[in-house]
């Protein structure tokens, strides 16, 4: 099994955190998002502990809300000691509605609206991650008008593409996120921020990408960020006390993917930062990280019912499920690989070659191509693993397919955290 929270019971059914997946499907219907709370907690603990152990005081992870934003996630991550990064008024409001402390929110976004900025300041958001000079001016004006000094991090781009290290330069300098170091704009950005009343610059933010398997990319990022921080110190006399390294650690989606040891990677990054700081006689900054996928992806799975099963002679077989790109658009967007199991026959040999297709009128609506599962019958429960990140959050109502419910499992009990959408929910928006 890909994950230790999966098992098979006497009935031959897949179990998640000890609960029979077929029973979950029967009780709550399909498609169904399932989240193992304990797994989320363990993932948070790994980050919190490692960052506490290896990095300066005040270093901690921020849960990247965009991966899985619903009220019920916030008390879980908060009680494990994380902050949260949010990227819209909607995510701020969801976190606050769940009782998440505003001062542990970091407000991201390359195009926050003026209303969102005003709302964030008014709500006491702890820190804005300012993306550009324009935003800086609006934010500072808003902070002054509300009579506060807003803490900020300045988002810079270090010019690193973790997936194509050979083509280092152009890829990431040319981005709609942040201000590039290479063009000299980031230095001007800092100069301007330091001269702006109403904001207090805590340090810098940079995010290099997602689904990254090695610490080397983050070490390169640290090198560039530190070099920039040294330039800023030499030019402007300002020493940054916080480095926010963004998110990006990978998770295994299929057996062939490497497993990564997050704690060991954090230690490697910490050691690298420490020696860089010593070399440059730079005071060790506290470090923030923004893991998303690596906190929640492997805690989630999606259950479907197998519908029509179709064989195109000479080509392939299709198993069609009652969801698809509406609840998981990642195959359609990125051709992402997933592990699929027949949860109703988890002990049977996985010898049926098929493509798992969704129900939308779109030939790209697939969940996995050319996978092997135990030969399904109509109404078997099909489980797709590692769907905790970027699935629920990216779901849509394409074809007027309704969004699934989300159940959270804790202490051997399932609870509905988000109920299934109804057609009335949807029609209520319309005149
Ligand atoms: C997407 C994103 C994250 C989270 O990335 P993961 O790969 O899910 O860990 C963190 N910070 C920023 C700024 C992001 O855009």
Image (cartoon, grey):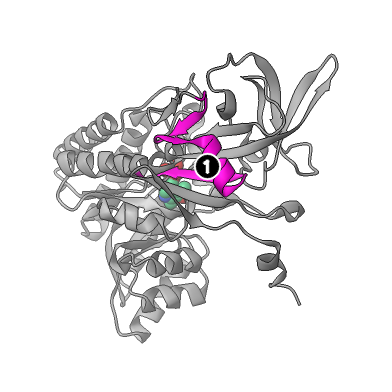
| Residue topped by disc 1 | 24
Residue 303 placement: quadrant: top right
**Would residue 31 be counted in the magenta stretch?**
yes
Residue 144 x %, y %: 34, 83
Q: Quadrant of the N terminus?
A: top left
Mark 1, ligand 1, within 8 Å: the answer is no
Task: Write the residue at 69% across / 55% down.
Answer: 397
Per the image, is 153 magenta? no
> Where is 345 relative to 412, above or below?
above
Foreground pick, 192 / 401: 401
Q: Which residue occupies the foreground of this view, 89 or 202?
A: 89
Q: Is residue 181 visible?
A: no
The one of 61 and 182 positioned closer to us in this rendering: 61
Find residue 192 and report its image quarter.
bottom left
In-image side of 308 versus 281 (left or right): right
Whole-percent x, y for residue 328 in the image: 61, 43
Q: Quadrant of the C terminus?
A: bottom right
The image shows a total of numbered marks equal to: 1
Q: Secondary structure at mark 1?
A: helix
Instruction: State the extent of the magenta-drawn residues as a range.
Output: 11-37
As displayed, is residue 398 above or below residue 355? below
407 to the left or right of 367: left
User: Which residue is found at the position 31% from the left and 77% from the top?
Assistant: 198
Looking at the image, residue 24 sits to the left or right of residue 99; the answer is right
Residue 118 in the image, given as x and y percentages of width and height: 44, 78
């Amino acid at each position: 099994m890909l994950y230790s929270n999966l098992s098979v019971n006497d009935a031959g059914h897949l179990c998640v955190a000890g609960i029979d997946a077929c029973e979950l499907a029967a009780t709550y219907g399909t498609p169904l998002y399932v989240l193992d709370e304990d797994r989320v907690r363990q993932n948070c603990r790994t980050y919190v502990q490692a960052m506490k152990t290896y990095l300066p005081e005040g270093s901690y992870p921020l849960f990247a809300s965009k991966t899985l934003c619903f009220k019920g996630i916030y008390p879980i991550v908060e009680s494990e000691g994380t902050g949260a990064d949010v990227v819209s008024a909607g995510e701020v409001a969801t976190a606050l509605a769940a009782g998440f402390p505003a001062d542990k929110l970091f407000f991201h976004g390359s195009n926050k609206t003026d209303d969102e900025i005003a709302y964030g300041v008014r709500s006491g958001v702890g820190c804005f991650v300012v993306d550009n000079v324009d935003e800086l001016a609006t934010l500072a004006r808003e902070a002054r008008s509300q009579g506060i000094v807003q803490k900020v991090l300045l988002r810079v781009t270090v010019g690193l593409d973790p997936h194509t290290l050979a083509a280092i330069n152009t890829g990431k300098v040319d981005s709609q996120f942040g201000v590039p170091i290479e063009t000299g704009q980031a230095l001007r950005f800092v100069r301007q921020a330091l001269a702006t009343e109403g904001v207090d610059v805590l340090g810098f933010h940079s995010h290099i990408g997602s689904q990254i398997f090695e610490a080397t990319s983050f070490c390169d990022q640290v090198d560039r960020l530190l070099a920039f921080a040294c330039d800023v110190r030499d030019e402007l006399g300002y020493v940054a006390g916080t480095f926010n390294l963004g998110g990006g650690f990978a998770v295994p989606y299929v057996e062939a993917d490497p497993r990564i040891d997050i704690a060991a990677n954090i230690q490697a990054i910490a050691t690298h930062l420490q020696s860089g700081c010593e070399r440059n006689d730079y005071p060790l900054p506290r470090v923030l990280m923004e893991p998303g996928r690596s906190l929640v992806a492997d805690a989630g799975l999606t259950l479907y019912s197998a519908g029509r099963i179709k064989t195109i002679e000479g080509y392939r077989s299709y198993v069609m499920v009652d969801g698809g790109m509406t609840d998981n658009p990642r195959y359609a967007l990125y051709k992402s690989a997933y592990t699929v199991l027949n949860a109703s026959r988890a002990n049977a040999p996985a010898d049926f070659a098929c493509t798992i297709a969704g129900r939308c009128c779109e030939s790209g609506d697939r969940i996995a191509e050319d996978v092997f599962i135990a030969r399904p019958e109509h109404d078997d429960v099909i489980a797709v693993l590692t769907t905790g990140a970027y699935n629920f959050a990216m779901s849509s109502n394409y074809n007027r397919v309704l969004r699934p419910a989300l159940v959270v499992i804790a202490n051997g009990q399932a609870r509905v955290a988000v109920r299934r959408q109804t057609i009335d929910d949807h029609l209520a928006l319309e005149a």
